[in-house]
Image: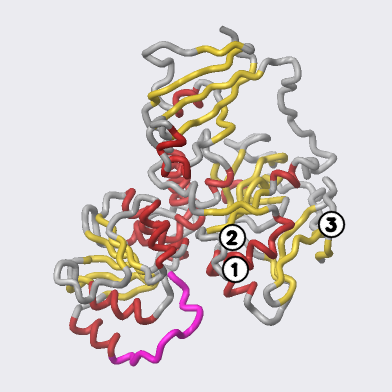
Amino acid sequence: MLKPTSSYDSNKVYTIAITNHQKAELLQSEIDFTRPLAPDEIAGQTLATLISTGTELNSAYLTESSFPKQVGYAAVFRLDQVGAEVSGLKVGDIVFASGSHSSYQRQSAKNVVLLPAGLSAELAVFARIMGVSMTTLTTTSARPPAKVLVSGLGLVGHLAAKNFLAAGYQVYACDPVEARRQIAMTEGLDNILTQVPVESDELYGQFPLAIECSGHEQALLDAALAIRKGGEVVCIATPWRKFTDLSLHALHNAIFFNYAHIRSGWEWELPHHLQDFKHNSLFENYAGALRWLQEGRVSVSNIYTKYHPADAQNAYQDLLHKRNNRLAVVFDWTDIASEGKLVNPQTKVESQTDRSDLQQNLLYIQTSNTALTSNIHGMSMLIAGKIVEPELPFIYQTPLEAIQDGWRIIQFPNTSLMMDESRTYGLGCEFILEKYGVSL
């Protein structure tokens, strides 16, 4: 049962639901979060969730019946409760799960992945969509450094291109929408095309793998024509509707004469967890995606917009009408989380260290890119109220070393500043970290 809400109560659960055609609301849920956990369960307060644009718009927001619909399957939350038989996780840990747009998450412990140190919740949620194309990365017969074609540069295609680039492939990607191509180029993707290169003497027949991420039948046909003989076309995007009146004969012809292998790229081809005689699993891929995000091998910092969950209607409308020139929407639940922890009142919760009597210290470090493993070339510190300018060699060589020494990132680099050297003065990316109780 869901009901409208205009204020937040720490003893309630709130959920984003599609309540009518093109209508999204933040509602109070009657989920009983006081019900004791099963021995293998964990639960806690949501920090961030990600809209899966194609799925949530087409299967829920644009539908005409069967409301309300609860949506979302990418969440990061902080553990407030841990079941008696759970090992390897503790209260206070931050984990990724395929959770819905809700202020409270409850999962089997085997169905979450602990976030790497220093990775923010709003970046970590993208591991879920990265996992879509990581299934193809796992199952394709094409191997690096082969040329790979990605058709469609929405969120799924954009991340597919970055995944395959990170894995060592030569990636070519196409989309007829200029704004999507511009985002891809700004994000460092080269070889961006307006359409599948079926008429290119240089590229025609050069791809052992084409990944179809648009759901458009013309793109599927073109991909079948563009691959080399015996190549694969993997259909990742859901074909939500018919776009053309293409004859099936044209596709049949391409399959037959090009020896094309056309198959589904649905991610559920893989088991959820590792099994004997199976290569990879969904949760292994999610863990790998989280590492790539933390290491900076895949960057998502500049492709999304944050919204408060209470502003869900505007978020879905902006995605539907492509108003904000970004590919994705992340819901930031921390404001609701700050109203109070959603915990079982009968469960003892570990409290965080009281820092009221400790001195906050700050570490400013400059790097040439956003990767946590990038070399530091500038550093300053505020220790016990005094500015310190460390001498060379710096005490840390990378941001990751600082994190491993107990510093906590409180501000990631603003990647938009990298486009304007007059504002960054050549310093590139700046991380700000904090630590309590450090002395000179």
Residue at mark 3 to residue at mark 2: CA–CA distance: 22 Å
Disc 2: which residue = 51
Number of other residues with Cα within 10 Å of mark 1, as a class: few under 14, some 14 to 19, many 20 or more? some
Task: Residue under label 3, please give it.
Answer: 6
Label 1 sits on residue: 56
Please give the range of residues in magenta: 237-249
Q: Position of residue 422 (x, y in %)?
A: 43, 36
Q: Are marks 3 and 2 in contact (CB under 8 Å)?
A: no
What residue is at 69 percent from the left and 77 percent from the top? 21
State which quarter of the image contains the C terminus. Answer: top right
Residue 241 seen in the figure: yes
Q: Is residue 241 magenta?
A: yes
As drawn, the label of residue 64 is: none
Asked whether disc 1 touches disc 2, contact meaning CB atoms under 8 Å apart, the reply is yes
Q: Most extreme residue toward the front, as rendered?
A: 422
| Location of residue 19 with respect to 116 vertically, above or below | below
Percent of width and height locating residue 343: 78, 43
Q: Residue at x 51, y 60 (%)?
A: 325
Q: Amino acid at mark 1?
A: Glu
Is residue 102 within the magenta segment? no
Colouring scheme, one of rainbow, by chain, secondary structure, one colour? secondary structure
- Does residue 44 appear anywhere in the picture? no
Please determine whether, in this image, residue 150 is positioned above or below residue 45.
Answer: below
Secondary structure mostly taken by the magenta-highlighted segment of the chain: loop
Which residue is outermost to the left?
Answer: 201
Q: Residues within 10 Å of mark 2 (few under 14, many from 20)?
A: many
Give the quarter of the image for residue 394.
Answer: top left
Q: In this orientation, which residue lies closer to the viewer: 30 or 333?
A: 333
Upstream in the sequence, badge 3 or badge 2?
A: 3
In the image, taking residue 402 as reference, residue 185 lies left or right, namely left
